[in-house]
Amino acid sequence: MDLPKRKTTRLKGYDYGAPGAYFVTICTHNRKCILSNIVGEGLCALPKNTVTSIGKEIEKSIQYINGNYIGISIDKYVIMPNHIHLIVILEDSGGDGTPPLQNVIGQLKSYTTNKFGNTLWQRSYHDHIIRGEKDYQKIWEYIDTNPLKWELDCFYTSETGQ
């Protein structure tokens, strides 16, 4: 039996090790809401995003990347109930071997999955090559306001992971 071929989501011919900014979205396995909880706090209150214990470990892993990888930084991120958004910056490291984007994301997913001992993430991830300051600002704002618009999010589910 022939298995269906997965369509690549990567831009053909693009060097994902090249210096630049990338917007990355990673979803949990089966889009389970295990990373945070977004709830309103009373009448007309803004939703509050509270990370779970798993979400806190994801946050530590992101901070570890920022503090320990030369030429790589996570410039902005948000941990949503069933996915995370990141702006990943790959700098020109002068030939010291900055890993390509897929290695950075692969290491983040692998480390956190091993820490929790089960499948944490869905296969692959979505990326967008940020093309200029206007694109960057639009994505930054999207990340900032994503928890406020959770019920309108394409990944929204009313399920809670706790």
Image: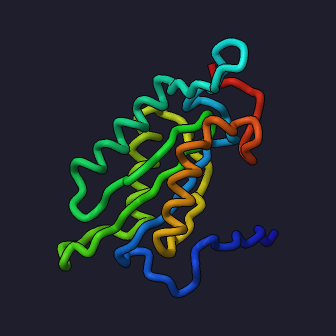
Quadrant hosting residue 105: bottom left
> From the viewer's perspective, is 61 left or right of 14?
left
Q: Residue at x 37, y 75 (%)?
A: 17
Quadrant hosting residue 97: bottom left
Q: Residue at x 55, y 51 (%)?
A: 141
Q: Residue at x 42, y 29 (%)?
A: 56
Closer to us: 13 or 107: 13
The colour style of the image is rainbow
Outermost residue, top direction? Answer: 42
Q: Is residue 17 above or below residue 59?
A: below
Quarter of the image where the N terminus is located: bottom right
Quarter of the image where the C terminus is located: top right
Q: Position of residue 136 (x, y in %)?
A: 49, 64
Outermost residue, right direction? Answer: 1
Outermost residue, bottom direction? Answer: 13
Q: Position of residue 20 (x, y in %)?
A: 39, 72
Q: How many marks?
A: 0
Q: Is residue 143 above or below residue 100?
A: above
Q: Is residue 131 above or below residue 159?
A: below
Q: Residue at x 38, y 70 (%)?
A: 100
Q: Position of residue 127 (x, y in %)?
A: 56, 64
Closer to us: 86 or 68: 86
